[in-house]
Amino acid sequence: MTLIEKTNKVKELSLAIKANFIELGKHLKDIRDNRIFEEKYSNFIEYLNSEDFQFCERMAFNLIKVFEEYGQLQRVAVSLPLRTLIQLAYISDRQVRNDLEKEAVTVYQKKEGITNFYKKVKRTAQRTNTTVVKGDSPAFKCERQLKQLLNDIKEFIQTREYLVQRLAEGKIFASKYPENQIIQGIIKEIENYQL
């Protein structure tokens, strides 16, 4: 195979990766939102960590987030790299995200300034998105912030449930070694966090 043929094959496979990424997000969201994991597990985090997936817990949430934001927007999803889609998906302000999506399509088509643009998107995604966008009403800003808070709480509760379960299992295991001061000290330190 020539370089052109190999390159075309790599491009074809990379599109399949993106399609599978979004499809994985769809299925994970369904399992989480419809609590299908309860057939075998007490919470979604336990499900993620118990099954033999080829990705970590954080990636699972990225898969879900990208599906939630881009599962129906194939034109945007196809034209942007996954790392950019992941960062864009976490920008809660729709207007800011839409502006960055348009800019992204242009940047990636021209193939100029990609690194600087990615850094810009990442910085924007890391912000708390609490500023009022031109035209935002205070009520809309409040709604946006509360939706983000609700999403954060849902993730926190699922993580907390998993940690409480792990602590209970850890205490049972540690009870076999009551004379080990290091183990007992670690258990006491964990308990101080009052999960």
Image (cartoon, grey):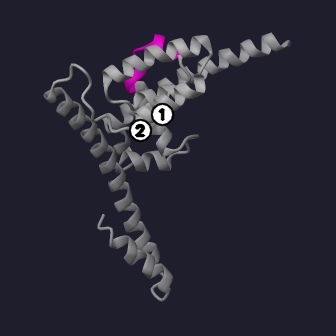
Q: Residue 180 got which mark?
A: none
Q: Is residue 78 left or right of residue 6?
A: left
Q: At 73% across and 12% down in the image, what residue appears? A: 8
Q: At 41% across and 28% down in the image, what residue appears? A: 89
Name the residue that disc number 2 marks: 126
From what the image shows, is residue 176 above or below residue 47? below
The front one of 56 and 125 is 125
Q: At 37% across and 26% down in the image, what residue appears? A: 68
Q: Quadrant of the N terminus?
A: top right
From what the image shows, is residue 86 above or below residue 112? below
Name the residue that disc number 1 marks: 122
SS assignment at label 1: helix
Q: Is residue 163 left or right of residue 11?
A: left
Q: Quadrant of the C terminus?
A: bottom left
Q: Position of residue 12 (x, y in %)?
A: 66, 14
Q: Is residue 130 left or right of residue 75?
A: left
The amino acid type of the residue labelled 1 equals Lys
Q: Which residues are magenta?
A: 68-79
How many angstroms separate mark 1 from mark 2 (CA)?
Answer: 6 Å
- The answer to the question of whether label 1 and label 2 lie on touching residues, with beta carbons closer than 8 A, is yes
Q: Is residue 15 left or right of residue 129?
A: right
SS assignment at label 2: helix
Q: At 52% across and 32% down in the image, what residue appears? A: 119
Residue 137 in sight: yes
From what the image shows, is residue 8 above or below residue 184? above
The front one of 112 and 159 is 112
